[in-house]
Amino acid sequence: MEFSTKTLAPERAPGACVVAGVFESRKLSAAAAALDRASGGAVRALVKRGDMDGKAGTVRMLYKTRRVAAERVLLVGLGKEADFGAKAYREAVRAAVGALAETGAVDAHVFLADLPVRDQDLAWRVLQTTTVAAETLYRFDEMKSKKSAPRALKRFVIATASKAGAADAARGLAEGRAIAAGVALARDLGNLPANVCTPSYLADAATRLARDWKLGVEVLERRDMERLGMNTLLSVAQGSRQPPKFIVLRYNGAGKGAKPVVLVGKGITFDTGGISIKPAAEMDEMKFDMCGAASVLGTLRALAELAPAINVVGLVPATENMPGGAATKPGDVIKSMSGQTVEVLNTDAEGRLILCDALTYAERYDPAAVVDVATLTGACVIALGHVATGLFSNRDELADELADAGRQAWDRAWPMPLWDDYQEQLKSPFADLANIGGRPAGSVTAACFLSRFAKKYPWAHLDIAGTAWTSGKNKGATGRPVALLARFILNRAAMA
């Protein structure tokens, strides 16, 4: 899909389709009013007849409207004007793109970015139009013998009526295209089956990404991890025939002396639960247990295109969690890279075991901040559902930064407690700590476990177990939280 911006009058927009909005009060947007004037009242007549009531998500197509250059006019319902905010704007774009995809239109001029959205500027509206359109049109058919027929829609023009905001529109478009590409990469990796997307495949994908975008890359093998003492990571890999990988990606946009932000992504390419095996129902979805890793790669992809003045390191510990004859057993005690010992009470709490060694490894970069991203706990799904990502941090300022970035990106995260009181649940009579703390506050105790390995720098943990993929008929990876992470990094670069 080719995205661009352009300033012109709606009635003069050439090509297959022009898109404008109508509010539920049957009030026309400025673009719809311009089309109505040019057509001699055709739009208002349609609204007056009740064929377009303006309810959110509704659409209506007009063909060959007189004195309108485009072959089609697509009217999109915007809902109540008083309630028109970020969510309503995104829903309007999604409805428009969905309707366009069902036509034979090869191009479209979309006049929605001029609509006022509370607390959001033109750059935000253009960015969101780009990312929502790309998300709506996304398909994954790589594993099918018969590919989907190519969509007719090839060119998507985000149109505005005034040149006053051209610079903001261009900035929003550039960020939107890069973030959309990063999200698509994360979704592609997440949607691949686990027999394809192995730890080695992830390492190869990172190497290709580094080659294409001139990033630094290093892949540590099992022997390298053994020398480093990454025993908790290796304990998870023991039951699998797939070799573990530890992937290091480096984006250098600032000087060598600038401390990097380190992103750590959980890369469990398939999670059976190990000896503490999971129930069979929906276990196929455990191919998504590497979505944290995918989001780190997707974020680096977006940043490489946007080239912000900041240094970023991506760390991906990657392995399967399988119940082989050599697999770690409940009750085993493992010495982590940090020197702390862990009693493994449940082998299905493996994500924290690979992340803790990665968090220790992150110390060597003297980081400005470390953010880990993981499909870590079902408890977070119970707490927050599938709307918000769980956000934990040992610094309130860092938590605020990430929460703000999530709101800006519409990839929202919700702050959760990380109080010392919860650490009591991790006590073990045989090791420095246990890898689980029981059923109460499971997402909190998981974050508390990770915090033991992140004391030397500002750190945050994003639990994406409820937001990394969707189930049911439209099962698939979402690409979250690439948009949040990219906005967080871009904001940091702008403040430097």
Image (cartoon, rainbow, N blue to C red):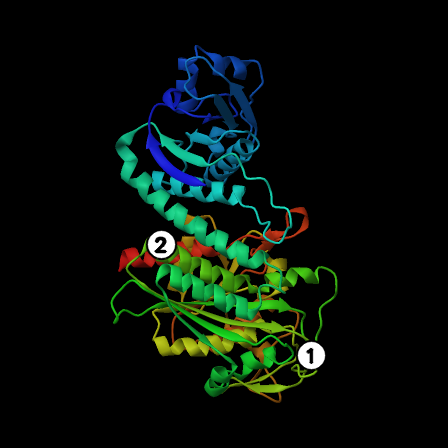
Tell whether 240 sits left or right of 111: right
**Which of 236/439 is in front?**
236
Which is more toward the observer, 488 or 188?
A: 188
Indicate the position of residue 124 as horizontal and vertical percent values.
38, 42
Which disc, if any, is residue 324?
A: 1
Q: Residue 164 got which mark?
A: none
Marks 2/1: CA distance? Answer: 42 Å
On the image, the x and y values in percent for residue 217 come to 40, 70
Depth check, front residue: 62 or 468: 62
Within-10-Å neighbours for mark 1: few <14, some 14–19, many 20+: some
Location of residue 436 with respect to 27 vertically, above or below:
below
- Residue 30 lies, with reference to residue 41, above or below; the image says below
Farthest residue, direction top:
40
Residue 259, by quadrant, is: bottom left
Q: Which residue is depicted at the point 52% across and 34% down?
A: 152
> Mark 1 belongs to which amino acid?
Gly
The residue pinned by badge 2 equals: 305
**Mark 2 vs mark 1: which is more N-terminal?**
2
Local SS, label 1 = loop
| Residue drawn at (28%, 59%) of the image | 309
Q: Position of residue 38 (x, y in %)?
A: 40, 14
Q: Amino acid at mark 2?
A: Glu
Residue lying furthest bottom: 430
Rendered location of residue 280, percent (x, y): 75, 64
